[in-house]
Amino acid sequence: MAVKKKANVAKQAVPAKAADDKTLAQVEECAMGAAKSLGMPQFPAWVTAYFHPYQAYGKEKKNSELGKAVSTFALIGLVEAVATIIMMALVLAFALPIVGIPFTIVGAIIMLIAYPITSVIGGFVVSCLYFVLAKVLGGKGSFMEQTYCMALVSGGVVLMMAPFNILQAIPIIGGIFGLAGLVVALYGIISQYRMIRAVHSLSQLRAIVVLVVPALLIIALIFLVIGVATIAAIGAYGSGVPVPLQ
C-alpha cells in the first residue's frame, strides 16, 4: 500500500514540459543565452531551475550543502543590488534636471554589501518556515535540499526580473516593463511550488499550503508592525508628545 501511495505521489509530480509551449520555449532559449553570455556558471543553473524545477531538483540535490546555499543567496543579493543601482542611476539621470539629487558611490557600495547579507539571512529564515510546515504535512526532503534548490529558483526569478526592474525606470514606457516583471515573478511562484513538490513529494494541495502560509504570516507580521507604529504615533500625537519627522 505504501509503495502504491509513493508511486501515485511521484506520478503527480511529473512536470509539464516547457517546450510544449512555443512562446515559453522561446523565452527560455533567450534567457538561457543571456545567462550564459554573462559568464557566471551559476546563472544557467538558475534559469534551468526557473523553467524546469523538477529536473533541476533531480540534478542539483546532490550539491545541496550549506556553503552552496549561502553562496547562492549571496549572489542573488548581489544581482539584486547591481540591478537596483542601475535602476536608481537611470531614475536619477532622468530626474536630475528636476530634483538635482546626485547618485552617490557610497550608497552603491552600501547596497553591494547589505543586499547579499540580507539575502542570505532572509533566504534561510523563509526556508525554515517552509521546512517546518512541509514536515508537519509529511514532507520527505531534507532542509539543505529544500534550501539550496529553492535558492536556485529564487536566483532564476531575480535574474529574469533584473532587466525589467532596470527598464521600468524609463519614463512613460517603464510601466510596461514593470508589468512584464510582475508576470515573471508570478511564474516564479509556480516554479517554487513545483520545487516544493519535488523536494518533499507532497500533493498539490499540501505544496500550496507550504508555499502560501509563510507568505501570509510575513504579510501579517508586516501589517502588525505598521499597525503598532501607527497606534504609537497616534497615541503620541494625542498626548501632546511630539513625534520626530523622518
Image (cartoon, rainbow, N blue to C red):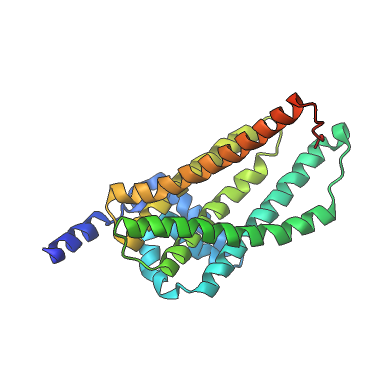
- In the depicted view, which residue is nearer to us: 75 or 94? 75
Is residue 52 at least partly visible in the picture?
A: no
Q: Is 121 rendered above or below residue 219? A: below
Q: Is 223 rendered above or below residue 44? A: above
> Residue at image x 18%, y 58%?
8
Is 125 left, or right, of 13 in this rendering? right
Name, please, the residue furthest toward the left. Answer: 1
Q: For residue 105, what is the image quadrant? A: bottom right
Q: Percent position (x, y) of residue 83? A: 67, 52
> Residue at image x 73%, y 55%?
111
Name, please, the residue furthest toward the top. Answer: 238
Q: Percent position (x, y) of residue 128? A: 47, 60
Q: Percent position (x, y) of residue 41? A: 55, 69
- In the depicted view, which residue is nearer to us: 236 or 12? 236
Q: Quadrant of the N terminus?
A: bottom left
- In the depicted view, which residue is nearer to us: 45 or 236? 236
Q: For residue 75, what is the image quadrant? A: bottom right
> Residue at image x 61%, y 40%?
225
Is residue 49 at least partly visible in the picture?
A: yes
Count the labels in the image.
0
Is 133 left, or right, of 167 in this rendering? left
> Residue at image x 82%, y 35%?
244
Is 118 left, or right, of 184 in this rendering? right
Q: Percent position (x, y) of residue 7? A: 18, 62
Is 156 left, or right, of 244 in this rendering? left
Q: Quadrant of the C terminus?
A: top right
